[in-house]
Image (cartoon, coloured by chain):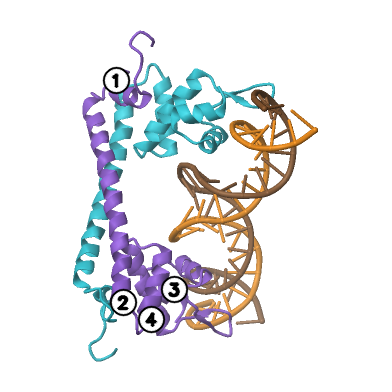
Chain colours: A cyan, B purple, C orange, D brown
Amino acid sequence: MKIGDVAEASGLSAKTIRYYEDIGLIRPLRGENGYRDFARADVHKLRFLSRARSLGFSINDCRLLLSLYEDRSRASADVKALAEAHLRRVDHKIAELEGLRGTLRHLVMQCHGDERPECPILDDLAGPKAAHDG
Amino acid sequence: MKIGDVAEASGLSAKTIRYYEDIGLIRPLRGENGYRDFARADVHKLRFLSRARSLGFSINDCRLLLSLYEDRSRASADVKALAEAHLRRVDHKIAELEGLRGTLRHLVMQCHGDERPECPILDDLAGPKAAHDG
DNA sequence: GTAGGAATTCCAGTGACTGGAAGGTCAAGG
DNA sequence: CCTTGACCTTCCAGTCACTGGAATTCCTAC
């Protein structure tokens, strides 16, 4: 199977697949013409990677997940721990963004948004200013 | 004012401040010894940048915000438009993360997380498998 | 034989820094 | 006068996960 077909089958771009080979996530065979020749297992791995990446796992997590996936004697606890750690990171990120969204919303609401220069958004960014000292 | 003091006053690292000069956000003077010599206006700008960055505005947005800030005849509508666009990006990102969090939570809950190898998380990542073909 | 599409490699760029090396400057202390 | 140590300087490399593009080769069809 050539890289274009694999790209279509996995949902990853050919560029990304070559990159994944570069960093050692997959090791496709090569044909006589130098073209990569992907086995079914490679395509399977790439679909696995595609899904894991879409869930926001880092490449490093993906590497670990793949090795756990291929380890028939793994403990599901190891996988769960990884997923939980990632979930906590996602929770944290969401909380951070929600905080920032609150501030942004507040600022946007306060700004009348017309042709005049007065702007509470810029005033906020500029920070507290002494009353007597413009 | 030297870079260390400015770093403390602005909440940015000295490295970051040098970087901001590199990309043209600020232009501090230089003393005879080659050290940067920050004016009050520079510190003010850096605090502005620090705050804008902490609200998630990109460096490019910051550049625009700064120029609007310094343009006495700006229209607040321009600032508001920028902030609203950013707010939409944040909303979008939160929605994306929330979707992915739902999936992760679901998977984590389904995984018993013990010493056995059976793992719904890995099964999900591996994708649909034909029933007769392991 | 020629056009095209798809494959190859390699280099550079993204965003916003961060780390580290190698060296210059300054104030204090012996 | 010399050293120590904190601070400053520049420059290069690395981060993360790709992505774009150039130059070249391969295969297929007409």
Tell me the subunit letter for badge 4. Answer: B
Q: CA distance from mark 3 to mark 2?
A: 21 Å
Residue beneath the point at 34% across and 24% down: B122
Give the residue type that dot 1 points to: Glu
| Label 4 vs 1, first from the N-terminus | 4
Report which residue position mark 2 lands on: A126
Q: Are marks 3 and 1 on the same chain?
A: yes
Of marks 4 and 3, which one's residue comes earlier in the chain?
Answer: 3
Point out the frontmost of discs 4 and 3: 4
Q: Which mark is residue A20?
A: none
Residue at the disc numbered 1: B115
Q: Secondary structure at mark 1?
A: loop
The reply to whether the C-beta atoms of the residues labelled 3 and 1 are less than 8 Å apart is no
**Any mark on residue B4, and which?**
3
Front residue of C10/A77: it is C10
Q: Amino acid at mark 3?
A: Gly
The CA span between labels 4 and 3 is 25 Å
